[in-house]
Image (tube, rainbow, N blue to C red):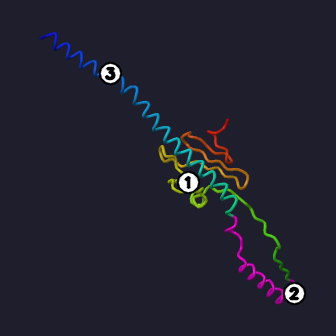
Amino acid sequence: MKNEKGLELLDVLIIILIGAVIAAIMVPKIKGEKKKEIMDRCRTQIRALSEAEFRYYKDAWRSSLPSPDSLAKLDSLATAAKKARKKVSFTLPDTINVVRVFTDDINKLKEYLPSWAETLAIDGKCPLDGKNYIFVVRDSLFFSITCPNGHGESVKGILSWEKK
């Protein structure tokens, strides 16, 4: 009888040991998959925001141009000013110089997200801990979007994780 109980105890210890070994193997793998999923979501957001920067740069200046009505109003004001004072000279330019710039305003960029990213919840924050992405914008010359947790960055549209 004593040998049978010892055998049962040994069986239980072997089962517990096997369970511990399996857990030791599986837990890091599960955590690694979770980290990779978070990193992929972060990189997808950075890619979408980078594309939005270029769309904003290309198109946002259009909303700042004066309307034809306001230009006509300026022309009539200039004509009235010329009639009132002979020395006043006012001419409307034939062309309008447009300054294109990048932006670090996430709300402006949301309007320019690519179609593939419209269903994503892009809020300008890393999914790991909710820290804001670091935007560096220098007028029309340079922009970068960096994850504060080291998941990657986009410098003038070049994604750090795609470098060869």
Instruction: Provide the residue designation for mark 2.
Output: 86
Who comes first in sequence, dot 1 or dot 3?
A: 3
Measured Cα–Cα span from mark 3 to mark 2: 100 Å
Picture coordinates of residue 6, whole percent (x, y): 19, 13
Name the residue type under label 3.
Answer: Ile
Kindly identify the residue that appears in the image at 71 percent across and 74 percent down: 66
| Quadrant in the picture for the C terminus | top right
How dense is the environment of label 1, judged by Cα within 10 Å: few (below 14), some, or many (20 and up)? some
Would you say 13 lies left or right of 119 here? Answer: left
Task: Where is residue 4? Give x, y as percent.
Answer: 16, 13
Which residue was labeled with disc 1?
Answer: 117
> Could you tell me which residue is drawn at 49 percent across and 41 percent down?
37
User: Label 2 crowding class (10 Å Cα cut-off): few <14, some 14-19, many 20+?
Assistant: few
Element under label 2?
A: loop
- Whole-number angstrom distance, CA of label 2 to CA of label 1: 58 Å
Which residue position holds label 3?
18
At 70% from the left and 76% from the top, the residue drawn is 67
